[in-house]
Amino acid sequence: MASADSWDPPASSRDWQYVVLHHSATDEGDVASIDAADRKRRDQFGAAWPGIGYHFVIGNGQGMTDGRVEPTFRWQQQLHGAHANSQAHNRTGIGICVVGDCDASPPTPRQVAAAKRLLEWLSVRYGISPDHVVRHADIAATRCPGRKFPFEELREALPAPVGASSGRSHEELF
């Protein structure tokens, strides 16, 4: 699994306010295959997408190592997302995609552990509170990230909101 240090973007950070959770709705995949599929898509004006709409992808062992967190070009360059069907959430929300069809089966234990670690890091680093961690279905007409996605488990694992005492420092977390 990649270290939290490798998640620091080389570009100046945006003012991130949300995290939007997704599943790929496919049995397998990786950043390259999702990027290739998204490059075939068109926006509402007919323009081609510039590539993968998410900021991070978490592998399930089918095309990408199980539990591996891989930042995409959008994260590295601190670009807005193309994942939420909501302009506000695309501009201020970090898109995380868990590879798999979470309507059919839950993410792997390694994916859940990796998602918890990534969410905790993002929460501390950007001051994102648990109530600003949302499912794609919370903001758009979709079932994403699927019925078997452990949303409450992930959100409950987050540290206390900024200003509240969690009892742990940033250094202790990472």
Image (spheres, rainbow, N blue to C red):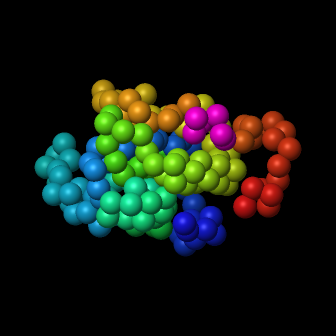
Q: Left or right: where does residue 159 sit relative to residue 13? A: right
**In the displayed structure, would residue 93 be above or below residue 52?**
above
Q: Residue at x 84, y 39 (%)?
A: 165
Q: Residue at x 61, y 68 (%)?
A: 3
Q: Left or right: where does residue 32 sit relative to residue 70? A: left
**In this view of the protein, can residue 86 be seen by the observer?**
no
Give the total number of marks visible in the rendering.
0
Q: Which residues are magenta?
A: 153-158
**In the displayed structure, would residue 90 be above or below residue 152?**
below
- Residue 143 figure quarter: top left
Q: Main secondary structure of the magenta part?
A: helix
**In this view of the protein, can residue 63 be seen by the observer?**
yes
Q: Residue at x 41, y 33 (%)?
A: 148
Percent from the top left, x then y, of residue 11? 53, 69
Q: Left or right: where does residue 158 sit relative to residue 169? A: left
Q: Residue at x 16, y 46 (%)?
A: 45
Q: Quadrant of the C terminus?
A: bottom right
Q: Quadrant of the N terminus?
A: bottom right
Percent from the top left, x then y, of residue 47? 17, 54
Check if residue 137 falls in the magenta segment: no
- Residue 56 figure quarter: bottom left
**In the displayed structure, would residue 116 be above or below residue 69?**
above
Percent from the top left, x then y, of residue 42? 17, 50
Percent from the top left, x then y, of residue 59? 41, 58
Towards the viewer: 46 or 54? 54
